[in-house]
Image: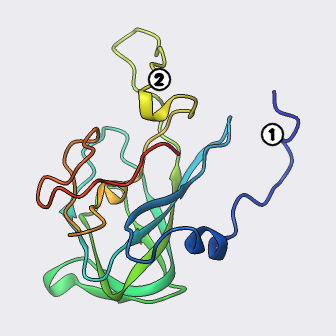
Amino acid sequence: MSPTRNVPQVLVQIDDCLALVAAERGGALWRLAEAGRQLDATVVRLPPGAAVEEYVEPHPSDLDVLLLVIEGTGWLGTGASRRPMGARSVVWLPRVAPRALTAGPDGLVCLIVHQRRPAPTAKGLPSVPVPLPALAGVEGGEGPCLLDRVCPACGRVSIESSARYCSRCGEALPSRAF
């Protein structure tokens, strides 16, 4: 057990995190990866005009998500239900509600937090963790939605979680080794 596991700690300074990554790069910029945690959290950037098309979480243990807009502007939802979001907006995404985000002209940076999902198991069989090459050493859980699959160049969302390049423009997707 890590000596700091039960000690509150500052994990990231958002300004420092943003300064290390080019402003036009989209995708996940930081992820909570502490062992033994009960939460998952990700800092995500959508480039200007990029969108995460409307979807509903398909997972059987759907989760509520809390989103904090750190910088930039954007819209939540589509059509008549589209609502503006600005820096410092706190957004609740109920577990069964359709979700869609669109970044404004300056892009959108948000912190996304939700309860950690348990590792999947086959009926009656214990879960056996299998490290993927890009995620070796990172404890389980998964993203709250598809925001970490957004192409930094064109904003298209990758359907395949293992995709390394955008199927629309061929741009390399952000590294998933968090």
Residue 102 x/y as whole percent: 27, 78
Q: Find the residue positioned furthest to the top.
A: 125
Task: Tell me what residue is drawn at x 81 percent, y 27 percent.
Answer: 1
SS category of the residue bearing label 1: loop
For marks 2 and 1, give the one nearer the viewer.
2
Q: Tell me residue 40's x, y (percent).
A: 54, 49
- Up-down: is 162 above or below 44? above
Name the amino acid type tagged 1: Arg
Q: Position of residue 177 (x, y in %)?
A: 48, 42
Front residue (pair 99, 129): 129
| Residue beneath disc 1 | 5
Q: Is residue 99 above or below residue 143?
A: below
Q: Quick one: 163 or 119, which is closer to the camera?
A: 163
Which residue is drawn at the image coordinates 46% and 16% (left, top)? 127
Which residue is painted at 47% across and 11% down in the image?
A: 126
Residue where numbered disc 2 is placed = 131
